Image: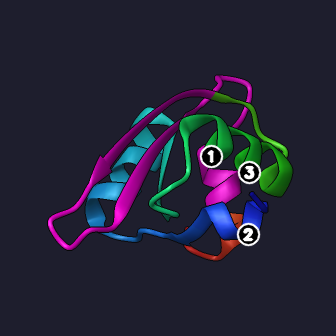
Amino acid sequence: MDAFDVIKTPIVSEKTMKLIEEENRLVFYVERKATKADIRAAIKELFDAEVADINTSITPKGKKKAYITLKAEYNAGEVAASLGIY
């Protein structure tokens, strides 16, 4: 699966901004069929960042959210800034 097909859009809200600042986490809508391995590979390819942990959930609207924790040596704020959301 192509990295651009896996990662749909970043989720921007007050909660996600707090996660970026305090927990080094990013939140994206991802392809519903994407596995955690697909998401990990897409983040590595698109942002050159190593992933420490991924939690996923399906929203009531049927969209899949991925909460991505980056390893300590990578800054979620810098990744968010490269996306223009921070």
Neighbour class for label 1 at 10 Å: few (<14), some, many (≥20)? many
Please report the residue visible at 69 percent of the width from the left and 55 percent of the height from the top. Answer: 79
Q: Is residue 9 above or below residue 2?
A: below
Near-viewer residue (18 or 1): 1
Label 2, secondary structure: give it: helix
> Residue 85 vs residue 73: left or right?
left
Residue 21 appears at what percent x and percent y? 45, 45
Tell me where the magenta segment starts and ends, as one range.
Answer: 52-80
Please report the residue visible at 81 percent of the width from the left and 57 percent of the height from the top. Answer: 46
> Residue 37 vs residue 48: left or right?
left
Which badge, 1 or 2, is on the more N-terminal residue?
2
Please report the residue visible at 85 percent of the width from the left and 50 percent of the height from the top. Answer: 45
Residue 48's disc is none
Neighbour class for label 2 at 10 Å: few (<14), some, many (≥20)? some
**Residue 84 falls in image quadrant:** bottom right
Marks 3 and 1 in Cβ contact (< 8 Å): yes
- The residue under label 1 is which amino acid type? Ile
Which badge, 2 or 3, is on the more N-terminal residue?
2
Near-viewer residue (12 or 64): 64
Distance between the Cα atoms at labels 1 and 2?
A: 10 Å
Label 3, secondary structure: give it: helix
Q: Is residue 8 above or below residue 46?
A: below
Residue 39's disc is 1
Q: Is residue 25 above or below residue 7?
A: above
User: What residue would you read off at disc 2?
Assistant: 4
Total marks placed: 3
Distance between the Cα atoms at labels 2 and 3?
A: 8 Å
User: What residue would you read off at disc 3?
Assistant: 42
**Residue 37 falls in image quadrant:** top right
Please report the residue visible at 38 percent of the width from the left and 56 percent of the height from the top. Answer: 65
Q: Is residue 73 magenta?
A: yes
Q: Is residue 84 magenta?
A: no
